[in-house]
Image: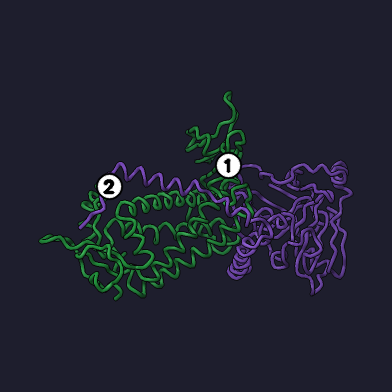
Amino acid sequence: MAKFVISRRKFLTSASLGVSGIMLSGCDVFDSQLGVGDGLRSFLEGANGLTWRAQRLLAGDSLAPEFTEADIRQPQRPNGVTAPDDDVYKGLLANNFADWRLEVSGLVEKPLTLTREQLMNMPSRTQITRHDCVEGWSCIAKWTGTPLSLVLDQAVVKPQARYVMFHCLDTIDRSLSGDIKYYGSIDLIDARHPQTILAYGLNGKPLPVENGAPLRVRVERQIGYKMPKYLRKIELVDGFANIGGGKGGYWEDNGYDWYGGI
Amino acid sequence: MESVARSQSTVGPDTALPKDATLIYRQSRWTRLTHWLWAISLFFMLLSGLQIFNARPQLYIGKESGFAYNNTVFAIGAENTANGPRGYTEIFGKRFDTTGVLGWSGPAGRETSRAFPSWATIPSYYDLGTARVVHFFFAWILTTTLVVWLVASLINGHLRRDLVPRIDDLRRLPRDIVDHARLKFHHAREYNTLQKMAYGGVMFVLLPLMIITGLAMSPSMNAVLPFLNDLLGGRQTARTIHFIVMLLLVAFFIIHMLMIFAAGPINELRSIITGWYRTDPPAPGSKTPERSA
């Protein structure tokens, strides 16, 4: 029979040229279809909902892994905004947050205004957990704070409330319509999870400014962008339509998945 | 059951075939369908994965990333030198200049600092959120396809007949390696030893390891499967393994392509598109290890 004959050198040369040609052709063609709101992207985002439901189903009320003191080998790496230059924040910081208040409002029976001392006098929880950043890095630290569920109980959540919105003091972005302060949200299942705390302590010391002083959220079964720093207000809502771009958070409005479990 | 050998005359229009060649139905529809679903999903997962990696182009060993100590095993970056910005790749502390490809790349005069170059990522511009959307969408496709393939291959006998290694395969291994090195190919119904090892390795080692290390990076799945990270050596080790498995899959892809080109691309492509494969006629008086299907 006629056999397919080719010299080894010729074969290796042409094959590697072919492979690199495929690689070099690039994927610019997809770029135009992948912006937030584009058809193809919206279709692919359908998988986010699937991931969320699957993880919800599997995770139930299980706890995130906790570590030992020996695992704390370095300071908690800060990210996002690390030194808010907002006048209000700087004023509060100058006074060591004596005038800072946490507001709890929205769909609650008893809106609250809590001082730092009031929060610290409530039962606390300390946990050594691993912070996983969406970028890919991780850092283990000890967090101390008030379980969010205790604050929610005190405010008495109305039955129609579905999400907890966090409003922050730091400006994350500047747009034509003004400064954008960080905001984010979780649902009530994660809000009432025992490891979800409003943290005021880090590695046995008061929470430093770069890590979100005076108060930040810890949601240990999700990625770092779900844990807002520089908290000023908790708002119980039944949807996101009226907040920011309507997707439940600053990063969500910029294309990140709302459920940061992966 | 599907490996019915037919003489060329019953097959039809493929008149280019020599008279003594035999077309056999080699790849079932499940093998063909899942093959192309993998090809598509692995393509998108690779390029979106490189984009995700660009957000933090470093790999570490252990439970966390060392910032106050060093557990970095791999890094891609850029630095300013007397000759302008240069890209570098660092493996176990040993630095290589990779300007133009890794660390510092782009059209002349408009180079930017990015780990993997823009032609190798989806999207080509930096967008971590979108890369994650693409990556996790195809992760579902890839995993579902693997399960479908496994079930179909158990039922239609593909696993038992074509992939399970036999004593015979072990005996043939040295000759198989020599034949491959000389680009001498036997076109038979059966996979040869190296094929079995390569395909079996991808299906039962690399793809499952990819899925497991992927799950180990999810904080939500850590709560469900807390032992997984301990087993793998920590979340950052899992990420490093995920990356290494990617390199192995790329290596598999390159060899896969080379072998197709060397063994006759038309015949190989036809078998994975239509299922029909042209086998070599048995050499007269030879003891070719042709086994019955």
Q: Which residue lies furthest to the left in this view?
A: B285
Say if residue B83 shows up in the picture: yes
Q: In this view, does A26 lie to the left or right of A111?
A: left
A140 w.r.t. B200: above or below: above
Asked if residue B147 lies left or right of residue B168, the reply is right
Instruction: Name the residue type under label 1.
Output: Gly
- The residue carrying mark 2 is A6
**Residue indicated by mark 1:** B66
Q: What whole-number distance in Å separates the C-alpha atoms at marks 1 and 2?
A: 51 Å
Q: Which residue is drawn at 65% across and 63% down?
A: A39
* Chain letter, colour green in render: B
* Chain at numbered mark 1: B
Q: Where is residue B171 in the image (x, y as percent from the top left)?
A: 20, 57
State the count of labels.
2
| Badge 1 element | loop
Three-letter code, disc 2: Ile
Q: In which quarter of the image is residue A83?
A: top right
